[in-house]
Image (tube, rainbow, N blue to C red):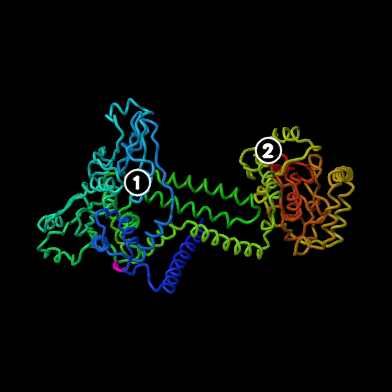
Amino acid sequence: MWVKLCCLLLYFLALFVLARVFEAVAWYESGFLATQLVDPVALSFRKLRTILECRGLGYSGLPEKKDVRELVEKSGDLMEGELYSALKEEEASESVSSTNFSGEMHFYELVEDTKDGIWLVQVIANDRSPLVGKVHWEKMVKKVSRFGIRTGTFNCSSDPRYCRRRGWLKSTLIMSVPQTSTSKGKVMLKEYSGRRIEVEHIFKWITAHAASRIKTIYNSEHLKEEWNKSDQYRVKIYLFANLDQPPAFFSALSVKFTGRVEFIFVNVENWDNKSYMAEIGIYKTPSYILRTPEGIYRYGNNTGEFISLRAMDSFLRSLQPEVNDLFVLSLVLVNLMAWMDLFITQGATIKRFVVLISTLGTYNSLLIISWLPVLGFLQLPYLDSFYEYSLKLFRYSNTTTLASWVRADWMFYSSHPALFLSTYLGHGLLIDYFEKKRRRNNNTDEVNANNLEWLSSLWDWYTSYLFHPIASFQHFPFDSDWDEDPDLFLERLAFPDLWLHPLIPTDYIKNLPMWRFKCLGVHSDEEMLETFQDSESDSDSENKELFSSEKEVSEDDELNASQRRGEGEPRCGAETCSCANKYCHREPYERKARSYGSYGTAGDMEPDWSVWPSEMLHCTECVVCLENFANGCLLMGLPCGHVFHQNCIVMWLAGGRHCCPVCRWASYKKKQPYTHPQPLSNDTPS
């Protein structure tokens, strides 16, 4: 997870540097920056009209270019970046969708139950033609959609009873606007009563109703009172301008940020005394002033702060975000980080996508689960101070120059999604290249695995966990004692030797006991030979049985053992212990109980059995390689009690033979441990 997070941070840093490169290239080719002011006098009438349409100001009664230019100047300073964005938006002939309502419930759910937006709905009465024709309606939809106004069509033929109850007996236009200035307040429906059905007149009607929600100040006394007033609004944005009504984008934002930011329009058209404006630091108009508890911020002085709906919306969202805004931001970041797994994962293509789907599901589930307690935590009443301090931190950090660059880059890349996706893909391919190079240097085999090999390994893993849950989830040693293992019998019935056995995970091997072989002393060869000859006559019958049993058990293992001996690898680096006999040893009274060997008489020097686990059988030879244990050798025992060289038995088990080479007991199954009985005392009680 931390690797993907670092990769994502590197990607954001690359985007930031790339945006600065684009600015430098644009400055070199055209000689201006995006923050450079534009003189409206040098613009054509078409460009001036485009700027007014983007800001939401009507120009139908202004035939002269001079009047249009003055209106642009009254609404705010024009920057090169805003002009470029407006021209690109006009050239893009994207069709904006309009909703077709199916009935009363659909209309109520989208229009009347939406508290933070404006709707324009064309109602078509039964057996009547629409009020606005198709061509004009498409123009209207495209014009109002720039300001976040949603549109729709309600045909009364789909629900005539609802139209009669509403009084919609003729075709008309309905506008839905929030009635109060509180979040999630009531919604009022207004019907268009004008006679002219041109697009500009309908748009003026819409902007007039939207502007009626904004508090308007007409004199300096009212401004002084409002400026010094303290109410529930912590953030206020003032527009000081010489206009009849605020621009449409300003009115649309007042609806969108209802309950979070208060919008105030100060009409300075007929002001004679502007001394109080100078006292509060307002020296020119138009000016967009943001007033917060931390101070005054002049909007439009930093990068990307254009006089448009999109730019001011991103600015206000960063200052006064909702919980939903933070959730969407975290959702985008988490999914971008999860998609990095597609490039970090190496191997088959199918493996990459399987890991990607798993990562996406895991990350999104964890995100939603982690947000649930956060939402409940924020609902607590005594956390208001924590919420205020958090918003204060947002306001401090997002009024910096760096934050303005980040917002400008966000608007640039969001308006060019192809560039964003191509840079993300290129960054991912670079990560894939370096990750593949790193793993090849580490001799990792999964880099060259193909789809069939990975699917085969995935199926083997699935069947192993499906058919052998005990081997996968139980570890050795166990606390419980089993006299008999019924699972072993059922397993043999379900999977006879003629069938293919599913693979068993080898994770249990690391839990098997290991220790070093040690001797108590060293004997000469003559003493060892004499001891062996004295004990040979007593154990002749037992040794014959031992030879016959070992011959049957290890017939299929002698070839592997001879090959390992031929490799010339020493089993242990220590000196061979002289006490190591060829066969395993036991006390004399144990010989009939077990046939795994015996050690010499009491007078012989013997291995240090105290370091052996209590459940392990005593022996001095590995039946896999047929070599004696050397002093200092690393040994490993199986649940059945038999002991082998650690290297020998690990290679045996890793080769898929999950059973003891001697008794064939399953190496991952617990068996009742053997306990060495104490010898009976020869002293008779008195």
Residue at the spot 35% in from the left edge and 28% down from the top edge: 126
Q: Nearer the viewer, mark 2 or mark 1?
A: 1
Residue 74, can we see it? yes
Residue at the spot 63% in from the left edge and 56% down from the top edge: 346
For the image, the number of numbered tags is 2
Q: Name the residue nearer the viewer: 672 or 339.
A: 339
Quadrant of residue 640 within the rendered picture: top right
The label shown at residue 196 is: none
> Which residue matches tag 1?
140
Point out residue 616 in the picture as x, y percentages from the top left corner.
Answer: 71, 47
Number of other residues with Cα within 10 Å of mark 1, as a class: few under 14, some 14 to 19, many 20 or more: some
* Residue type, numbered disc 2: Phe
Q: In this view, does 368 lie above or below 89?
A: above
Magenta stretch secondary structure, dominant: loop
- Magenta residues span 37-41
Quadrant of residue 171 within the rendered picture: top left
Point out residue 364 in the picture as x, y percentages from the top left corner.
Answer: 48, 47
* Residue type, numbered disc 1: Met
> Which residue matches tag 2?
467
497 part of magenta stretch: no
Q: Name the residue nearer the viewer: 339 or 562.
A: 339
Q: Is residue 384 left or right of residue 685?
A: left
Number of other residues with Cα within 10 Å of mark 2, as a class: few under 14, some 14 to 19, many 20 or more: some
Badge 2 or badge 1: first in the primary sequence = 1
Q: Is residue 468 left or right of residue 101?
A: right
Residue at the spot 79% in from the left edge and 37% down from the top edge: 499
SS class of the residue under badge 1?
A: helix
Residue 403, can we see it? no
38 part of magenta stretch: yes
Give the Cα distance between marks 2 and 1.
66 Å
Point out residue 405 in the picture as x, y percentages from the top left corner.
Answer: 37, 65
Q: Name the residue nearer the viewer: 78 or 228.
A: 78
